[in-house]
Each structure stands twice: as structure tokens, then as C-alpha cells.
Amino acid sequence: MADYNVWLNNWGSQAAEVIPLIKKKHEPSFRVISTTGVKNPAVMSEADEWYRETCNSKSSWEDYSKFALEICDEHDIDIIMPVRKMLEFSEHRKLFEERGIKLMLPSSHFMMRTLNDKASTYEVLREVVPECIPKYYKVNTVEEFKIAVEALRKEGCGVCFKYVQDIASQSFRIISFEKRGIDEFSSKTKHAIEYDTALEILSSVPKFKDMMVMELLDGLEVSCDCLATSSGNIIIPRMKLNTRIQEVRRQPQLMNLCDRILNFTGYDAPCNIQFKYEIGKTPKLLEINTRMSGGIHISEWATGINIPSIALSQLIGVDEEWNREWKKVQMVAREKYDKM
């Protein structure tokens, strides 16, 4: 019998990579119960038990919390690792903690809520990493959108936009100011949208959800998997060289920036800090994901540092050792890896 029962709610396909890392640790041992909103998810092959969620993302917290408590009671849950309704779990954590259930969430609900909003993140972090904040405007009407776009173009910037609260960059779009016509079907530009099309869509409502219109940044995307521990901050930068290959290496400049951010915010749960990075130039902050990244398993492959396991151990009061001196550069494919 496992020492602890862990519930992962609606993690999607990422859970199929995270669960094996959780179960690598044998003392104490963890039994994983997973729930998703779709049938036959990838996680079924890794979780000890899987169930279909009776609620969805549009369900009220009142309805979802009832479902959550039923899961906890039926499966004797000790730890919850939430993705769906993370902010609500954080706000109502006493509902679970008074039942002896621990949540893998930061201790500060205020900071989690702040970092979950991309515009608020930039404003707060101006104090600690001002050099990393890109040019941006926060808008929620089409007229504000037009003004922001023109202001950035006057400064010679390419322009992109996304909602201030977004998951997996679903709303991210790069504005194209050229008519493509039939060539649109042959374009390889990911997430591109013509300016006139964007205006037409945004004009369909008098006001839309808060959006960031910002400069389009050059360079490689670097995803830094992070966790504050009692023996220091774990920071593992992954440079995304293309859609298949990532390079995991020590990047002192980026690691120092992440260290400053973690210490300033006091964020004490797994998170992911993303930059745009060009050698010889100041890195620009893209966003902070207030949860584990989809590539957390790649960081473990390359360094041996198992962030999910270490984070769970911390929750139950166990300090798990990790390799602070990892140095080797690793070239890691999405499906295969070769430790150098």
C-alpha cells in the first residue's frame, strides 16, 4: 500500500510524463489518482486510477469543490496537485487543509494570483528585473488595441498579442500587416493573423478580456523549470532550438535572473519562467507559469533533478537531495534522449 495518495486534476497529456517522475520515489511511495475531462486520455497508461471529471472549466467553484471533496473522500486523498481551477484551490485551501489534505500550491495566494496575470507580473517585476520587461500595453477595447499597435510600430517593433490570463499560449497571435491571399495556406508562420482580421474579430464585442499588445521579441525561447528548496533554488534552463530539440544547460545570466525573481516573490511551489534570449543581449521576460511546465520531464532526463518528487517531498516535510553541480550540456529530443 502506498504511503500517500496524490490527485492530479485535469493535467491533460502532460500528466503522462509527470506521473512516472512522481512514482520514481519509493520511500515514501505515492499512489496517483488522475481525473480528466476527456475520454481515454494518455494519462490512463500511467496513473494508478483514472476517472472522468463530472465538471468542466466553466463549472462554478461551488460545483467543482463538491466534486473535489467527493474525490478526496472516496480515494482518501492526501495531496492535491491541481491544474484546473488552481486559483480557486489556492483561495479556498482551508477547505482541504482542515481535512488534512495538502495542496501543491504556493503559500501566498496573492502572489499566485499576481503572477497568473501576465500584465500584473510585468508591473510587479519592474522592481527586481526592470531590464527584462518588454514594451507592452494592456488593452480591452478595439480602439485601445489600435493605439497600442501603432505606438509599437512607430518604435520599429513587430507586434504580437495575447490575453493577460492564458494557458499554453492559446491566445497568442503575431500580427501580419501584409495581405497574403492564397499564399496564406502555404504559410509556415505559426500563430499569425492579419491586422484587419484581428480588428474585425475584436470589433465584434464592445469590450473584451484584458489583453497585452507587446513587442515581438527575437531570439530563442528559454523555459526555466524552477523550485525553491531549503538548500537553494532549483533552476534548469531549457533552450528550445526547434520543435523537437531542446538544449538543457547552465546559463548563469538566466539563472541569476530566475534566482532574483524567486527570492523577490517568495514563490515556493514549482513554476516555470520563460524568456526570449539572444547571446550578448539582455533576456526579455515572456511570462511566469504558476505550475510545472510541459517539459519538466526533459529537465529531469538531462540533469537527474526530479522536481515533482522534490516538491512532493517538501510538502510532507522531507528534504530530498538534488544535484546542485550539474554541468553538462544535453541535447534532448522530445521522444528520445541521450545523456552525454
Image (spheres, rainbow, N blue to C red):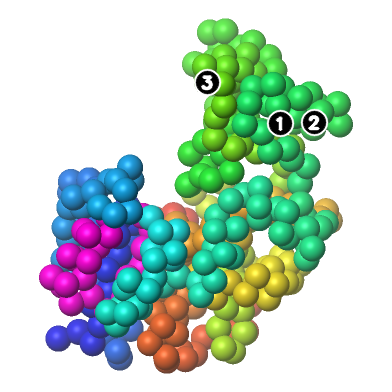
Q: Which residue is mark 3?
A: 205
User: For residue 265, which quarter of the picture?
Assistant: bottom right
Report the Cα–Cα distance between label 1 and label 2: 7 Å
- Whether residue 24 is visible to the viewer of this picture, yes or no, is no
What is the quadrant of the N terminus in the image?
A: bottom left
Instruction: Tell me the tag on residue 159.
Output: 1
The region drawn magenta spans: 64-84
Image point (44%, 81%), residue name: 310
- Give left or right: position of 192 versus 129: left
Residue type for callout 1: Val
Q: Is residue 39 visible?
A: yes
Q: State which tag comes first along the sequence, 1 or 3.
A: 1
Amino acid type at circle 2 is: Leu
Whether 273 is among the magenta residues is no
Instruction: Using the image, tell me which numbered label, if any, was put on residue 216.
Output: none
Q: Which of the image's four quarters has the C terminus?
A: bottom right
Relative height, residue 316 to residue 236 (above, below):
below
Q: Position of residue 212 (x, y in %)?
A: 65, 38
Q: Is residue 129 left or right of residue 168?
A: right
